[in-house]
Amino acid sequence: MRLSLQDVRFSYGRRVALAGVSMPVTGGVVGVLGPNGSGKSTLMKLIAGIHHGEGRISVCDADGGELSARRRRDVLGYVPQDPPGDVALTVLESVLVGLRRRSSWRTSAEEITAAHSCLDELGIAHLANRYLNELSGGQRQLAGIAQMTVRRPQVMLLDEPTSALDLHHQINVLGYVRARTAAVDGVSLVPMHDLNLAARFCDQLLIMRDGTSVAFGAPSEVLTSETLSATYRVEAKVLSDGGVPVIAPVASS
């Protein structure tokens, strides 16, 4: 599955949130970087179909055929920054909800196995019988990721999935997203703020500022001192660890 963006625009009333975001046809894991308020979350909501703006958002299959809006909904999964916790469901039940077929409310043994597998891979199998409203913010994030990925969507939108997680779970989640994306030959968009994790786990990076796309490409191509200065207003040294960029901030500029 492949995704492309062409001059995507959106406004909240008179406030422009996206002033023209473009991204060439791409697959794999795409990190979406940029300062707070640059439009990353709004872009996720447009791709997910929650908001409707201007421009072109195309989801294509392996043969290059563009999917209809209905088919796009079937292959797309979205996890917001703060998954709701005021739901009277256990973690396992919430994951099984993601597998419910329109024609049946029965849960098969295969579905239960798939749900437990997701929880285990994300390191939260011990939370299966805990209620969502009993969890920490990070635990709810992990439960939300499990609920979305259990049905194996080919387009995954994960809005800052590591923002409330400790380092161990950050690394585990991003490795999990990479593996799931590769398993379905799909595409995942992952807004995040940790540039070093993005450089290590993402195939491509889309860098945004003030509602526009600043750069797109492999981490080694776009994570330059010049781009970081223009985007984040910081001075930073860009080192290399086996070809993977390592960002060492020096000072705000």
Image (cartoon, rainbow, N blue to C red):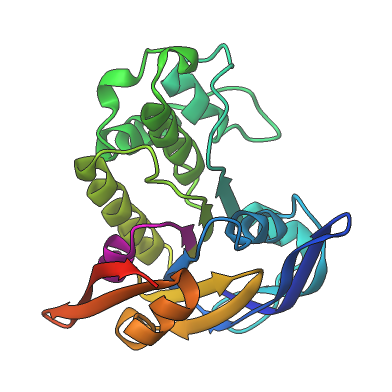
* Picture coordinates of residue 251, whole percent (x, y): 30, 67
* Residue positioned 37% across, 28% down in the render: 139
Dividing the picture into quadrants, the one containing residue 15 is bottom right
Q: x, y percentage for residue 56?
A: 76, 76
The image shows residue 54, relative to residue 75, as above or below, that is below
Is residue 224 shown to the viewer in this render? no
Magenta highlight on residue 195: yes
| Residue 40: quarter of image | bottom right
Q: Quadrant of the C terminus?
A: bottom left
- Tell me if residue 58 is in the magenta stretch: no
Extreme residue toward the left, this view: 242
For residue 232, what is the image quadrant? bottom left
Q: Position of residue 31 (x, y in %)?
A: 43, 66
Q: Is residue 198 above or below residue 151?
A: below
Front in this rendered view, residue 73 or 245: 245
Q: Would residue 248 be seen by someone viewing this image from the given angle?
A: yes
Q: Nearer the viewer, residue 147 or 35?
A: 35
Residue 118, position as x, y percentages in the image? 34, 38
Magenta stretch, residue numbers? 189-201
Q: Which of 44/37 is in front?
A: 37
Q: Is residue 152 left or right of residue 210?
A: left
How many tags in the picture? 0
Which residue is depicted at the point 42% across and 12% down? 134
Residue under the image location 36 percent in, 62 percent down: 183
Residue 72's place in the image compared with 234, above or below, is: above
Say if 38 sits above or below 151 in the image: below
